[in-house]
Amino acid sequence: MPPKKTKSRSRNKWADHYTRKARKDNYPARSVYKLKEIQKRYRLIHPGNRVLDLGCAPGSWLKYAAEITGPRGYVLGLDLKPVELALPGHAQAMVADIFDLNEEVTALLGRGFHCVISDMAPATTGHKDVDAARSFNLCESALGIAMDHLVDGGRFVCKIFQGPDTQAFIDTVKQRFTRCHIYKPQSSRKASREIFIIGKGKRQED
């Protein structure tokens, strides 16, 4: 009997109030509550918006964004992994590598988005500086995609693991948007080094 209890504890090591709440609310991951907190504070997504979700699997942010936009909007999610969640008709998920977007994805991106959201995270190594550097690379790519496909005045949010390059990334977001905010939701795990960088009002490019 003791081995069974140990195995159960190990399997549920990261389960918490938000994990249980996500199951109850029919979201595949607790991360949805981070976006809910960000949305409540900064109102990044509006009804009827076109939203691009980078790193969308397993689909919690995608589903929540689609709930906000409603059927007059459109939400596109991209991830290396497929999303198995049932989605409404105005939302779709595609398997894609953000570092090497294919023609099919590029065609869908061409129409312009009101908001780009990214909860992307690298495969962690346990070495804080290495993980932070990989996170920075993902954020740079997310920002590049946002600058290419956001409408003027559009909004952007992405997760970054704090490290030596974090301030440089924040400074870049400040240059590209009229307002920049740094936020750590209450639903983020206390031990996590993640923060969210938010840009509002994409500046018109020369």
Image: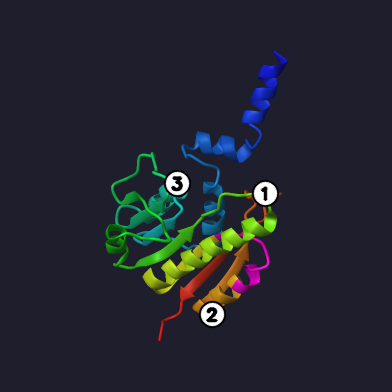
Task: Determine whether the residue tagged by mark 3 lies in a helix, strand or loop.
Answer: loop
Check disc 2 and report the residue beneath it.
Answer: 175
Identify the mark nearer the N-term, 3 or 2: 3
Task: Determine whether the residue tagged by mark 2 lies in a helix, strand or loop.
Answer: helix
Q: Amino acid at mark 3?
A: Ala
Taking the spot 51% from the left edge, 58% from the top edge, the residue there is 39
Identify the mark nearer the N-term, 1 or 2: 1
Q: Amino acid at mark 1?
A: Gly
The answer to which quarter of the image holds residue 58 is top left
Taking the spot 44% from the left edge, 45% from the top edge, the residue there is 59
Neighbours of disc 1 within 10 Å: few (<14), some (14-19), many (20+): few
Image quadrant holding the C terminus, namely bottom left
Range of the magenta residues?
A: 159-168
**Which one is nearer the viewer's eye here, 98 or 201?**
98
Q: Amino acid at mark 2?
A: Gln
Neighbours of disc 2 within 10 Å: few (<14), some (14-19), many (20+): some
- The image's mark for residue 126 is 1
Taking the spot 32% from the left edge, 58% from the top edge, the residue there is 73
Color encoding of the figure: rainbow
Image quadrant holding the N terminus, namely top right
Q: Position of residue 55 (x, y in %)?
A: 46, 53
Q: Position of residue 177 (x, y in %)?
A: 50, 76
Q: Is residue 12 left or right of residue 140?
A: right
Query: Alpha-carbon distance for marks 3 and 2?
Result: 30 Å
Neighbours of disc 3 within 10 Å: few (<14), some (14-19), many (20+): many
